[in-house]
Image: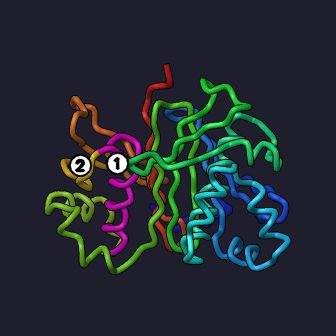
Amino acid sequence: MISITSIESFFTVVTDLQEAGKIYSHSGTVPLQFCQTLIKLDDLEEALQDEHTYRYLISLLSPEEKKLFSTFTYPKRRREWLGGRLAAKSAVLQFLQIDSTIESLSELSILPTENGAPQLSGTLFDKDRLPSLSISHSNRFAVAMATKAKSCGIDIQKISKKTERVADRFSEPGELLLLHDHTPQLNTQERLTLLWSAKEALKKALLHDQPVIFQGVVLQSMNVNQYFTLHLHFPGDLDRPAEVTALMLEDCILAYTIAKTCHA
């Protein structure tokens, strides 16, 4: 039986990033080694109100990141972007087993590509060692994933009524029936958010360069054990559907997928 998972029971390693607050981490090895991190955005928002802490947080960014951050005017955008970058940098450094210091964090630079995917660079790091990376944020949390796989995708979505209003844009009747049969304990909003988050994680991992959202991505089957395992057909899958793991994380759905091949 699936139950709601608390932050601390999934992200079991908690570290202090000095004035930046706590970083919650979860690591695994299936299908390949990975590290996931989470930052509570409410805590980050509070930290940003203090001038000393604000300067410290900005010092953790690369010069290019500082320039981009300065263009954001809305507090919500600044908080989400900064939380995502700090979570991602922490995930990368933990994956590489490097201590998180001002020097190591500011050396890493994560800038968006033309299609919005996070691109990782750092002159002090061996380019071949840098992992694949994915970032997401929703409501109260920012999350990130780092892995040596060729690609990965992570997504967090607050369970919301809005999924019902736009359900016809990303779901098909057969998918809804499959979800209903396998998740009788969930309500409609939870099922739709689960489907959306799983498709979003897959898109980030394998279809980030496609302009049409979720086109051709279809839920084929799923299993329910400790977490949800969804098998999604997508364009070009060669009859090898992507496997997405998902769980109910407090009032959100967290979904992630990892390509089963490493960097060359």
Bounds of the magenta span?
189-209
Residue bearing mark 2 = 217
SS for dot 1: helix
Among numbered discs 1 and 2, the one appearing first in the sequence? 1
Relative image position of residue 172 (x, y in whole percent): 16, 61
Q: Can you tell which mark lies on residue 100?
A: none
Relative image position of residue 28 (x, y in whole percent): 60, 40
On the image, which quarter does residue 55 sit in? Answer: bottom right
| Front-most of residues 255 and 115 | 115
Principal secondary structure, stretch drawn in magenta: helix
On the image, which quarter does residue 235 sit in? Answer: top left
| Front-most of residues 227 and 202 | 202
Residue 193 among those drawn in magenta: yes
The amino acid pointed to by label 1 is Lys
SS for dot 2: loop
The amino acid pointed to by label 2 is Val
The quarter of the rendered structure image containing the N terminus is bottom left
Q: Can you tell which mark lies on residue 203?
A: 1
